[in-house]
Amino acid sequence: MALREIREYGDDVLARPCKEVKEVTPRIRELIEDMFETMYDANGVGLAAPQVGVLKRIVVIDCSPEGDEPHLLINPVILETSGEQTGYEGCLSLPGKSGVVTRPNYVKVKALDIDMKPFELEGTELLARAICHECDHLDGHMYVEKVEGELVNNEDLQREDDEE
Ligand code: ZN
């Protein structure tokens, strides 16, 4: 396993649609392991393959505070959404920044697992937000396109929290 370089906003690879995975080759298996390692190392809750420069439809997510609920989604397709949540969102490809984005509060997604077996995953709140955010990456979209108002520096956000 190895850490991969996280591509930053403005990099062309983040603006391009990704291709479906047809087979989990040893290379892809290694990519997935590296994506988890890179996400945990950066204290992220999700990472999409284009963020490490690979245009494939692969997403890893772990929203649990302990980092022990890893989700791997290969070729994910969102089947259902409902409700609404509005809150700050960030991205490892735009370090130190956050912005307010409205997302569904419930998401059901279908995807393939490491053995290319189909499964469905339901998420609410942070997991729903992460699924939407990461699936957007696979189509070349970033949350900044959906931000309401200005991007803020995370340091300022921290200060606001402290004052409350
Ligand atoms: Zn992101």
Image (cartoon, rainbow, N blue to C red):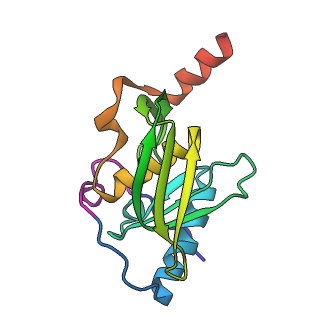
User: Residue 31: x percent and y percent?
Assistant: 49, 76
Q: Is residue 114 left or right of residue 139?
A: right
User: Residue 118: x percent and y percent?
Assistant: 50, 73
- Closest to the observer: 57 or 142? 57
- Closest to the observer: 57 or 123? 123
Residue sitting at x 52%, y 29%: 154
The part of the image, by quadrant, that contains residue 143 is top left
Q: Is residue 11 left or right of residue 6?
A: left
Magenta stretch contains residue 8 = yes
- The magenta-colored residue range is 7-17
Q: Is residue 150 above or below residue 111?
A: above
- Closest to the observer: 76 or 26? 76
Dominant secondary structure of the residues highlighted in magenta in the image: loop
Q: Is residue 73 above or below residue 130?
A: below
Q: Residue furthest top?
A: 164
User: Residue 54: x percent and y percent?
Assistant: 36, 70
- Could you tell me which quadrant the C terminus lies in? top right
Residue sitting at x 41%, y 54%: 79
Magenta stretch contains residue 54 = no
Q: Residue furthest right?
A: 66
Residue sitting at x 53%, y 21%: 156
User: Residue 61: x percent and y percent?
Assistant: 56, 56
Q: Is residue 91 above or below residue 27?
A: above
